[in-house]
Amino acid sequence: MLSNRSMAPGIIIPVLSYPDVGKASDWLCSAFGFIERLRIADHRIQLRLGNASVILSLGALPSDVVARSKATHSIMVRVEDVDGHFQRAKANGAMILHEPQLFPYGEKQYSAEDIGGHIWVFSESVADVDPADWGGDLLER
């Protein structure tokens, strides 16, 4: 799997919504020992604990997805071939929320809802991008 400095380490990464990601980060770091890895303005923070990651987000999901599903979190999964994964999910009846899309932070992603109403974001690293190139602040080198 391609390494990308802009992407949180790990294969499965929970994305949790908080009304104040800075306050949530401070608390999670103090209470549970997480370490801030990457800060993206005031709306997204990547935390690390050992070799695991969690992403804190001001609104973890697009508003159209929240309105439809009432979801408050998503699970991000890193895969080798996001297009192939997308085709498999679609062929097996996954409700596709967003088709594969390239992002400036070096990831190609799509999202789907499972049969239980859980939101999954599948992501493939397509480039190693310095977070400073798109407005992120990499705190852990």
Image: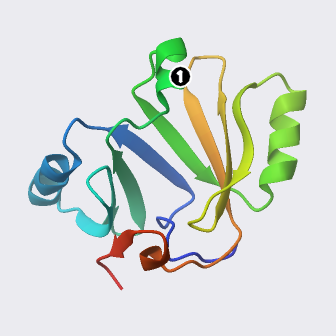
In the image, residue 34 sits, relative to residue 70, either above or below, namely below
Residue at 9%, 58% (x, y): give it. Answer: 30
Q: Amino acid at mark 1?
A: Asp
Report the label total: 1
Q: Label 1, secondary structure: give it.
A: helix
Task: Say which quarter of the image contains residue 72.
Answer: top left
Image coordinates of residue 134 in percent, x first then y, are 48, 69
Left or right? Give the position of 50 relative to 99. left
Looking at the image, residue 29 sits to the left or right of residue 97; the answer is: left
Q: Residues within 10 Å of mark 1 (few under 14, many from 20)?
A: few
Q: Which residue is mark 1?
A: 64
Image position, residue 110 (x, y; %): 69, 43
Q: Position of residue 40 (x, y in %)?
A: 34, 61
Residue 54 in the image: state x and y as whole percent. Answer: 38, 53
**Horizontal relation, residue 82 to residue 5: left or right:** right
Please identify the quadrant where the C terminus is shown.
bottom left
Colour scheme of this structure image? Answer: rainbow
Q: Nearer the viewer, residue 54 or 99?
A: 99
Look at the image and tell me in which quarter the N terminus lies: bottom right
Query: Which residue occupies the extreme bottom position in the image?
Result: 141
Using the rendered view, name the quadrant where residue 57 is placed: top left
Q: Residue at x 37, y 35 (%)?
A: 59
**Residue drawn 45% across the image and 74% down it:** 131
Relative to 69, residue 17 above or below: below
The residue that appears at 54% across and 23% down in the rendered structure is 65
